[in-house]
């Protein structure tokens, strides 16, 4: 009986000691996946600007993971282009992270806000604004 209680106490102590590391790894994994999605948005936009005529489109999927043992949940993912385009996301239990898009991007329908877990399709469209080629981003 004493051995069983000692084993349970030891297991609980080990779990308590390792849980912060598991949560940190899940947050790092989720942030890396979201950063890859942002990189894909930029690559698609650069491709549009370099190769296509106004009206051309690309579709990029952004995946917001649900909270699990291996992934941090995402409280929000926002793309706002006033005046410069930035992507901001907040992970459950962690601070927000911000990245600036280096392309001439507009969000004509206002900021794009993604909140629920799952796949979200973003459409990038090549357009002209004030005589310059820009990428319009739509959800």
Image (cartoon, grey):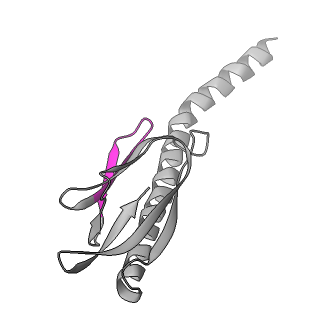
Q: Position of residue 132 (x, y in %)?
A: 22, 80
Q: Position of residue 115 (x, y in %)?
A: 45, 41
Location of residue 41 by image quarter: bottom left
Q: Who is closer to the viewer here, 43 or 14?
A: 43
Location of residue 76 by image quarter: top left
Query: Taking 126 as reference, is 5 left or right?
Result: right
Q: Position of residue 110 (x, y in %)?
A: 29, 51
Residue occupying the point 42% across, 75% down: 43
Q: Looking at the image, is 95 positioned above or below residue 36?
A: above
Asked if residue 90 is among those painted magenta in the image, a careful observer would answer yes
Location of residue 107 by image quarter: bottom left
Helix, strand or loop: magenta stretch = strand
Q: Looking at the image, is 19 positioned above or below residue 59?
A: above
Bounds of the magenta span?
86-100
Q: Who is closer to the viewer here, 31 or 125?
A: 125
Query: Taking 8 as reference, is 92 left or right?
Result: left
């Amino acid at each position: 009986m004493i051995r069983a209680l000692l084993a349970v106490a030891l297991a609980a102590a080990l779990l308590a000691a390792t849980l912060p590391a598991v949560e940190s790894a899940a947050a790092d994994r989720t942030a890396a996946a979201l950063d890859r999605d942002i990189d894909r948005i930029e690559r698609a936009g650069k491709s549009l600007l370099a190769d296509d005529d106004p009206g051309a489109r690309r579709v990029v999927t952004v995946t917001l993971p649900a909270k699990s043992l291996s992934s941090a949940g995402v409280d929000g993912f926002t793309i706002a282009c006033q005046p410069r385009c930035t992507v901001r996301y907040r992970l459950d239990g962690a601070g927000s992270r911000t990245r600036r898009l280096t392309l001439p991007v507009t969000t004509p329908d206002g900021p794009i806000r993604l909140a629920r877990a799952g796949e979200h399709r973003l459409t990038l469209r090549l357009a002209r604004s004030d005589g310059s080629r820009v990428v319009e981003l739509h959800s």
